[in-house]
Amino acid sequence: MKPWFVLILLAPLALDTEGARPLPTGVAAATIVLGGVVSRRAPALGLTAAGVLGIFVVVDGVSPGAPLSAAVLLSLLAGRNMRRLWLAEYAFAGAATIGMTYAVAKGDLTGWIVILVTQFGTAMLPWWAGTWWRQRAELLRAGWERAEQAAKQARLLERARIAQDMHDSLGHELSLMALTAGGLELSPGLSEEQRVMATRLREGSVAATERLHEVIGLLGQGEEPTGDEIPDLVERVRRSGVSVELCEEGGTREWAAPVLRHAARRVVQEALTNAVKHAPGSAISVRVAHSEAESVVAVTNTGSPADAKPGSSPVGSGTGLISLDERVRLAGGTLRARPLESGFEVVARLPRTPPESAATPAERAAGPAELVAARRRVRRDLLRASAVPVGLGVALLVALFTVYTVTVMRTSLGSDEFDRLRLGQERAEFASVLPHSISAPPPVLAEPPIPTGAECEYYRAGHNLLDFSETMFRLCFEDGVLVAKDTLRRGDGWG
């Protein structure tokens, strides 16, 4: 059921009250309907209407049930829909001003306290609850949206990783294919037709490699891929007829993290591929040296074959070394690639332990800094929203305690002064010790019958602020003479 429909149903309840006065009940019903109509589009007006409905608790001829119920619902809706805190502050201030003005105009000096307490309970607290409800829903929604974005980003990074690995593996195989075709092209036992076919095969392999570079491009790095280890890569190249020497120093050690093992494997794979493409027939050496601080992976090719035909060493796009440098950097290492007097050298230095920045795609997509900032913003908004009801609540308690203290001091008659009073005394004799009297005792106190023709005055018994027994003294006068003095107590009768 829609909240505004519930509010409209509450309006007739404000009218259907025994002994209700037409004007105030009509105003209450109209305020409920108006608040329900504007509660969604103008929540500040709805909150103001809720504060105004709290005034009807002290209006004669109006049953407060329906107005107060509507005030709670309007305030809750305002907290759900209102995003500007200063509007709520103005609404509360406006409602409190209207209530205090009404109480003063009515001549009820204590009615404004009742109005403020009612507005605090039926307007401010429900509004704060609605604000907390809205912010919690927004935080949950933002968290789910962030999680969806992180999952989408992780999927994209994973697809990029798979594409990059396909590029690396296929590029390596195509380079070996080009090398094999080049060998066949130079074989003396082939006919001219077979040599032409071998040339076409080599050129097609080279073109496919370059096209693979162009299509996939420089992609992001991922986690642990599938593929051969360094000795397997070296062995595969050897089987293609390339002279490759592998040297491992410091023993065979397990890599501390998949990102390190993959970076080392990629260094060897890319360097071997470049050596086969750009310097076919040259001698290649692969060195892997482990120490306590780092691991060094070096691939060097020396010499350039004199019988290499023009065009057999195609010019690369350069993206392979750029991608390799980025991969090594993400693993916390450094890469150096430089030409030698006769050959080329690629050296990668990798730490034994990867840095924390070498995170998985999902971790990189999670954006912890953004999530922390979002939590801080939500926490700040909650503190600001909580400060209004808490501050006003504290101020209201201070005001109530002040009024209570002043009332006790001005309406209390000490027990000693009460005991010294004697029946038959003129009121003028002890009028100087009498405080301001109370109009009537609370209904919970038992009171004896008032003497015929007498007028009674009521005083709080004692000056103790912490005495909540509600015991009172009653003094009855006839023609200015004290004719009765009684102590009124809760439940125990009088004495």
Image (spheres, rainbow, N blue to C red):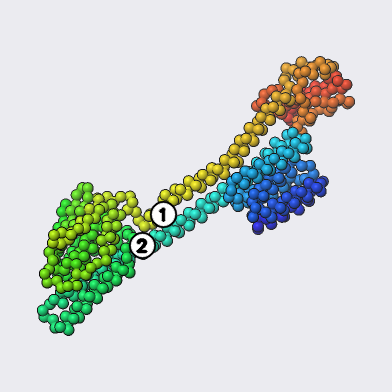
Question: Which label sits on residue 331?
Answer: none
Mark 1 nearby-residue class (10 Å; few <14, some 14–19, many ≥20) = some
Mark 1 — residue?
Answer: 366
From what the image shows, is residue 15 above or below residue 113? below
From what the image shows, is residue 362 above or below residue 75? below
Percent position (x, y) of residue 16?
78, 51
Amino acid type indicated by mark 2: Glu
What residue do we see at 21% from left, 62% from top? Answer: 271
In the visual, does 137 lie left or right of 12? left
Percent position (x, y) of residue 380?
51, 44
In the visual, does 29 lie left or right of 291? right
In the rendered image, is residue 255 in sight? no
Q: Pick whichever of labels 2 and 1 is earlier in the sequence.
A: 2
Percent position (x, y) of residue 342?
13, 61
What residue do we see at 73% from left, 29% from top? Answer: 490
Amino acid type indicated by mark 1: Ala
Could you tell me how far apart the alpha carbons at marks 2 and 1 are, in whole angstroms? 14 Å
What residue do we see at 64% from left, 51% from top? Answer: 43
In the visual, does 243 lie left or right of 43? left
Q: Quadrant of residue 189?
A: bottom left
Q: Quadrant of residue 105?
A: top right
Q: Secondary structure at mark 1?
A: helix
| Cβ atoms at labels 2 and 1 below 8 Å apart | no
**The N terminus - image quarter:** bottom right
In the visual, does 228 lie left or right of 219? left
Q: Secondary structure at mark 2?
A: helix
* 265 and 333: which is toward the camera: 333
Q: Quadrant of residue 287?
A: bottom left
Mark 2 — residue?
Answer: 158
* 61 and 328: which is toward the camera: 328
In the rendered image, is residue 152 in sight? yes
What residue do we see at 36% from left, 62% from top? Answer: 158
